[in-house]
Image: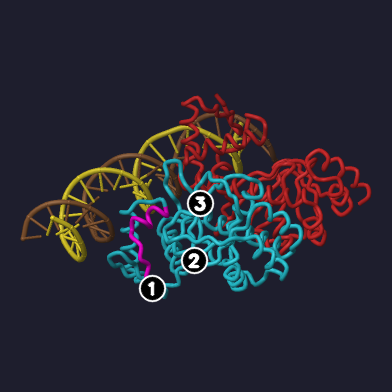
Chain colours: A red, B cyan, C brown, D yellow
Amino acid sequence: MSTDSPKIHQYIETHFPFFEAGLKEKIEEVAILKHFRAGELIMRQGQYFKHTVLIAAGLIKLYREGDDGEEVFIYHLNPGQACALSIICAAKQETSQVLGKAVEDTVAILIPVPAIDELMKNYKSWYYFVLENYRDRFDELLLMLDHVIFKSMDQRLEFYLENQVKQKGNNQLSITHQEIAQDLNSSREVISRLLKKMEIDKKVNLNRNYIEWLNC
Amino acid sequence: MSTDSPKIHQYIETHFPFFEAGLKEKIEEVAILKHFRAGELIMRQGQYFKHTVLIAAGLIKLYREGDDGEEVFIYHLNPGQACALSIICAAKQETSQVLGKAVEDTVAILIPVPAIDELMKNYKSWYYFVLENYRDRFDELLLMLDHVIFKSMDQRLEFYLENQVKQKGNNQLSITHQEIAQDLNSSREVISRLLKKMEIDKKVNLNRNYIEWLNC
DNA sequence: GAGCCGGGGTGACAATTGTCACAGACTTAC
DNA sequence: GTAAGTCTGTGACAATTGTCACCCCGGCTC
């Protein structure tokens, strides 16, 4: 664990600079690092948390599972963010309601449950972080709800693509129509048709295995 | 304000018995009561909070607004619960993302912003309450998302009616088809058709201005 | 009573989305 | 090379939902 410490220190300095001095040290003391490979499952629905999860590097996609196992994309988690549910589920020993997958190779800082009470009590920057983080997740969820309720599939598709491009920082998305359809709980044919329309409208270029986003 | 104090005390004892002794006293000291009439608007989207809002009596419906002013029902707030957003928006001086209306005459306990930091820091039962409350709202939001994404309108309608009956504690719902359609972001005709089917299936009795839920 | 209005029922039709079927293009394994 | 598998395009059709038109009913006012 001591070999991890300098790395934790570096990650915290980079992505959690707003933590107060004592808090940084405390986390370095109790936390451990965990690495996930791209594509790896990080948490399942129904699983218990033993730690609060902070994202130190990489990119995570969070999904909500339907009754028949459909996996609908909800939002991304970036370095500097935390899994909101992990904070609370860990504290209350409840189970996850979402499913998380690493999109890229990802590093997580795991803070064991027993330490959380102390952080919350003693470090103002910690509880501010938790609240702000929760608030942000809540907002993203509301935004998602807006789209599902008020928007049609073509608008949701555009929003989705824009979002993915923004997160990946690359307007060449290597993704198949089938994958998009799953993330939006639609079907491949529908996505193909809508993408074709978007290509005619000069919003994207379509290629085998990747889509180019024209952000004009 | 001092005339309110005994009432605050009573409300807290009844609906927030899990607060530790010192916390109850502290809240009685700093909080004020506010009454809302049935139908009254409690908060608008885009509004700033000056207080954290605890529900002491009555029933509140929360809505999310669409771009064209459509108001879609998200969830209820009951006595013993708090508006999750008010906790964080108040603390961070951000604006509301939802719209709240009193369904019945409602009493709210308002805790001024400056007091919140202290509550969070000194009272473990407060921050547990906040976390648990946030977690519960988050879960309700996820549940709502599930329904909108995965379910068809007839299932959402049944879920909606069941929910309203549960909240009102009365299986005679005095609500018009038009109002239901607004809450579900549908249209009156569709709701009427589906209700008619449900009547044939002996799930409800339809009457002018009210609907009887047959919870067999 | 006549007229109005809100609540509700219903048929016809349109738009969106999901489903099925099948074809062509490219990749990979052999 | 062939064969199999994956990715995409497309036409036909069905189901759901939204929209329009128009109806009746009950209660209200005048």
Q: Magenta stretch containing residue A201, yes or no?
A: no
Residue A123: in sight, yes or no? Answer: yes
Choose between A164 and A10: the one closer to the eye. Answer: A10
Pointers 3 and 2 within a single chain:
yes
Amino acid, disc 1: Leu
Amino acid, disc 2: Gly
Q: Are marks 2 and 1 in contact (CB under 8 Å)?
A: no
* B142 lies left or right of A42: left
| 3 or 1: tag closer to the N-terminus | 3
Question: Disc 2 designates what residue?
Answer: B58
Instruction: Looking at this view, name the residue that lies furthest to the front.
Output: B2
Pointers 2 and 1 within a single chain:
yes
Q: Chain of mark 3?
A: B
Question: What label does residue B214 carry, if any?
Answer: 1
Choose between A17 and A57: the one closer to the eye. Answer: A17
Write down the region rendered in magenta: B172-184
Residue drawn at (67%, 71%) of the image: B18
Question: Disc 3 designates what residue?
Answer: B43
Q: Magenta stretch containing residue B175, yes or no?
A: yes
| 3 or 2: tag closer to the N-terminus | 3
Q: Residues within 10 Å of mark 2 (few under 14, many from 20)?
A: some
Which corner quadrant holds the C terminus of chain A? top right
